[in-house]
Structures are given as structure tokens and as C-alpha cells.
Amino acid sequence: MSILQLSSRCSALAALLFALSPLASAATHGHHSARKHGASAFSGSRPVILTANPGTALDVDARKLNESDLQDAAKHHDAPVVLVGSAPLSSGKNDEALFVQLQSARLCGSAGCTTSVYLRHNNKWTTVLDSVNGDISVLPTRHRGMSDLLVGKNDRWIWDGHQYQDTLSAPPMPKMNGPN
């Protein structure tokens, strides 16, 4: 077994052990408040727990949605671990969000691994948030009928009617003083 395969399996095992831990159980059932532990100023947030669930319906959908990345990884002899999670983001009966993270040494950088969010409406998946770094939590606040998302400790994303938009302002770009 290569170091890369061992690393991928260790990441998946760590995610699975966390998902089975009392902390994860409490967090997913709303008994864990981030405010109590100083992790976040957003009370009532529900963390999205990502786990490896090979062969489940969500795993199959995640692999289809990320097929090109998985094929590219295979060409480079890389076998990413596919982590998935789901959460309702609206009160719509047929709406479901799928959170997907591909983990491997090749796909993850110094900021960690990226997560993408897809929304299913009437059995069709649409990308609503692409490639963000950091843990994701569902907030109790809503915009245009969809729950706000928290990425990391303070990066709030709100629904604009079609996809999630970042609320953090980017620093101003420096002026380019080129030759006139």
C-alpha cells in the first residue's frame, strides 16, 4: 500500500471516528453549542458532519457529480476518499443539500480540502456553493427561504435566490501604477 493510499484511509478513518464520537453526536442533535466552547459567535449553528459512506445513495450521487475530478485523480494514480454529508437548507419537501469533499494529498492544499455543496430539487442536483475551505455549519438564519451557511468560524454565506454568496468583503485591490 502506498503512502498516499494509507494517508487517504487514515483521513477516512479519522472522519468516521469523529462521526461516531459523542461530540459529533451531540453536535448533530443540537446539544452542542459552539458559543459554549468559544468556537463561533453564531449560536444555533448545526455543523455538517462529513463521512465516508461508500455505496450509499449520497455517495453514488457525490461520485457522479465529481466524476471528472475522480477520473483525473485516477489518471495520476490517486484514489481520493469521498466524504459526504447532507442537511436540509429549506423547508421545501423535495429539497436536500449534499456536501461533498474529496480528500487526497493531490487534491488538498495548504488550506485543507475543499467542500462543494449541491442542492437537489425535483431529483436534479445543482451546484450552489463550490470549493470552500473549512468546516461548514447550517445557521438558523435564512435569506430568500434558504438557511445561511457558516464556513470556518466567521465566513457567512447567504442565498441570493440561485446560489450562496459570501458576505465577507475582499480587501481592496492595490492600484496598479504602470507606465502611462
Image (cartoon, grey):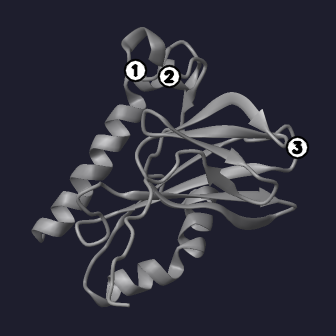
Name the spot of residue 143 as percent of width and height, x first: 78, 39
Q: Amino acid at mark 3?
A: Gly
Residue pictured at 58% horizontal, 56% vertical: 56
Q: Amino acid at mark 1?
A: Leu
Quarter location, residue 40: top left
How far apart, in angstroms, are the residues tagged by discs 1 and 2? 6 Å
How far apart, in angstroms, are the residues tagged by discs 1 and 3? 29 Å
Viewer-nearest residue: 150 or 171:
171
**Which residue is situated farthest in the top direction here?**
36
Q: Secondary structure at mark 2?
A: helix
How far apart, in angstroms, are the residues tagged by discs 3 and 2? 23 Å
Residue pictured at 53% horizontal, 73% vertical: 66
Residue pictured at 32% horizontal, 70% vertical: 107
Q: Amino acid at mark 2?
A: Ala
Q: Which residue is mark 1?
A: 23
Quarter location, residue 153: top left
Q: Secondary structure at mark 3?
A: loop
Marks 1 & 3, CB-CB < 8 Å contact: no
**Which residue is situated farthest in the front direction here?**
180
Viewer-nearest residue: 8 or 126:
126
Q: Which residue is mark 2?
A: 27
Q: Would you say 40 lies left or right of 14 here?
A: right
Marks 1 & 2, CB-CB < 8 Å contact: yes
Disc 1 crowd rating (10 Å Cα; few below 14, some 14-19, many 20+) is: few
Q: Earlier in the sequence, mark 1 or mark 3?
A: 1
So how many labels did they put on this image? Answer: 3
Q: Secondary structure at mark 1?
A: helix
Viewer-nearest residue: 170 or 30:
170
Q: Earlier in the sequence, mark 3 or mark 2?
A: 2
Q: Which residue is mark 3?
A: 92
Name the spot of residue 38 as percent of width and height, x first: 38, 15
